[in-house]
Image (spheres, grey):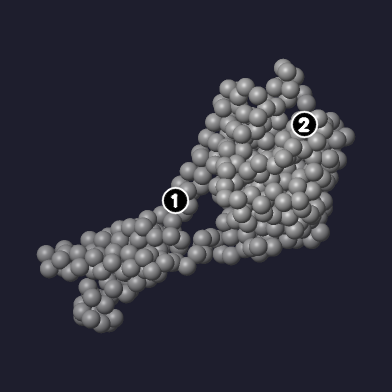
Amino acid sequence: KKQHILVCLSASPSNEKIVQTAANMAEVLSARFTALYVNNDFSLTGIDKKRLDMNIQFAEKLGADVVTVHGEDIAMQIAEYARLSDVTKIVIGQSNAKRSRIWSGYTLTEKLIAYAPDIDIHIIPDAGFYKKSRKSSLFVNTQLPTMQDVLTACGVLALCTAIGFLFLHLGFNDTNIVTVYIFGVLVVSAMTKGYICSIASSLLSVFLFGFFLTEPHLSFKTYAVGYPVTFAVMLSSSVLTGTLASQLKKHAKLSAQSAFRMQILFDTDRLLQKAKNSEEILSITCMQLSKLLDRCIVAYKADNDILLEGRIFPKTESSASERLLNGSERSVAEWVYKNGHCAGATTSNFSNAGCLYLSIRIEKRIYGVIGIPMNKNSVDSFENSVLLSVLNECALAMDNAHNAA
């Protein structure tokens, strides 16, 4: 059975050492080498995100197939991927094997052993214990609410209060009114972005209920002994349901993004099978990448060991063409063509360039260079994984076309 080594990627400063160790193991054992990143957190800081991108690029440079998956339980995602991909060895850092506190739960290593008892787990000493610079998991999406979100929340709670008055007039008990407010918080969570409006609505619903709908009215004083318990249960239920609704929205968005990106990959494979020549292959690849990344793509096709004139897909205004196809940008593309390594924006080579340049290559044969403008949002880890897969499909199609010519 062929060995398959899986290394876990993270934003840790010591992750580069772990990736290097795993790459050395893969080379010695002539094993397949995969680097896996489990995306379970939107709140990486700018420094951590940059470090993660560098670790991903380093793994790619060492020949790893970079894969990104999404999930809350990191150990479960790693174990499930390892099982489906016939991984024989998992390499992680020692910091993942330590408990940060006495009362902490099971470590990542302990969970991995439980989930994948038949796979060898290699723990590599790293430079101390790394704590991610992350915000509280409750506020994963910390974007401030818009005025529309605030008005929506206020409108929903006002409607809940009006329904509460109606229920009170009809002689319904407090339980029915509390249920209306909890439902209102769910509606707010579904109609607004992030957690802030959801949590604020949970707190405000308790105050509205206590002020308007309990005896004495228009006062926070209560005659009934059980009202404090009612308030506490109502607040807890509202916060819990609101948070769960927001998390459900987040996972639904993730699923939609994953489905879209996978569809791009499948469509690319289908379209490339119908392509008749290298020009058509390059055009299809660039248009699919443009759709994936929501930006124009620069392409240089190689012919007789030289790069031809660059083109932009889809066609754009002349000012953008002049900026993306100038001499300095072309020199970076030529460096990538000669050296076979990525360069340009977000890399250590020619970092001042406007584009990130990647080669279209299969083994040592390079058929062209792709440039991705980085003036918009940077390419995230999952997009990068799909991007590399599309480029591999393009290189394979061009190689087949070259051999058939």
Left-right relation of 202 to 364: left
How far apart marks 1 and 2 lie (CA) works out to 50 Å
Q: Which residue is drawn at the image coordinates 77% and 53% (left, top)?
A: 328
Split into 4 quadrants, where in the image is the C terminus?
top right
Q: Which amino acid does label 1 sit on?
A: Leu
Q: Where is residue 311 in the image (x, y as percent from the top left)?
A: 66, 41
- Kindly check if marks 1 and 2 are in contact, taking CB atoms under 8 A apart as contact: no
Q: Which residue is drawn at the image coordinates 61% and 54% (left, top)?
A: 319
- Mark 1 is surrounded, within 10 Å at the Cα level, by few (under 14), some (14 to 19) or many (20 or more) other residues, namely some
Quadrant hosting residue 284: top right
Is 129 located above or below residue 326 in the figure?
below
Q: Where is residue 52 in the image (x, y as percent from the top left)?
A: 70, 54
Q: Position of residue 9 (x, y in %)?
A: 71, 48
The residue under label 2 is: 303
Q: Which mark is residue 248?
A: 1
Q: Which mark is residue 122?
A: none
Residue 120 in sight:
no
Q: Where is residue 140 in the image (x, y as percent from the top left)?
A: 53, 60
